[in-house]
């Protein structure tokens, strides 16, 4: 294996190592594809945060809220990093206006 710039490891034999993670020259764990274990954890955290934001954003936009809470929750989800969506799912869902079933809606 040859170490090239930016921490990538290229295998000359194109064979994967027997272990899932091996130690590089600096003693850090790396995957067979040259990505360090710490980088994988960061990537998974960022993907999880993106999914959390997307689900919270869709939830805020598709539900009705009391008063002007929709704007407040929309701003909280968009501007408060990971804390905004977590607060929305913990607190904001209590402020939804219950949907009226079609059979009990008042007529025109």
Image (spheres, helix red, strand yellow):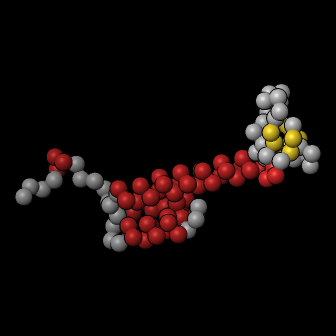
Location of the C terminus (image quadrant)? bottom left
**Residue in front for this viewpoint, 40 or 48:** 40
Q: Tell me how many marks there are.
A: 0
In-front residue for pair 17/41: 17
Is residue 84 something one can see in this rendering? yes
Residue 53 image point, x, y percent? 51, 57
Residue at position x 49%, y 61% in the image: 88
| Left or right of 27, for residue 104 | left
Q: Quadrant of residue 86?
A: bottom right
Image quarter (top left, top right, bottom left or bottom right) of the N terminus: top right
Residue at x-position 80% and y-position 27%? 15
In this rendered view, identify the residue nearer to me: 27 or 95: 27
In the image, residue 14 sits, relative to residue 108, either above or below, namely: above
Q: Is residue 91 visible?
A: no
Residue 52 pos. (x, y %) = 53, 53
Within the image, what quadrant is residue 11 found in? top right
Q: Is residue 92 left or right of residue 4?
A: left
Horizontal side, residue 59 vs residue 15: left or right = left
């Amino acid at each position: 294996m040859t170490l090239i710039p930016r921490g990538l490891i290229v295998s000359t034999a194109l064979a994967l190592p027997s272990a899932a993670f091996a130690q590089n020259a600096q003693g850090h764990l790396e995957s067979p594809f040259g990505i360090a274990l710490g980088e994988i954890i960061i990537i998974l955290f960022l993907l999880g945060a993106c999914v959390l934001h997307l689900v919270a954003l869709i939830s805020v936009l598709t539900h009705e809220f009391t008063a002007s809470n929709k704007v407040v929750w929309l701003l909280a989800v968009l501007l408060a990093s990971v804390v905004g969506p977590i607060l929305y799912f913990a607190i904001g869902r209590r402020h939804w206006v219950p949907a009226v079933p079609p059979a009990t809606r008042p007529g025109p």
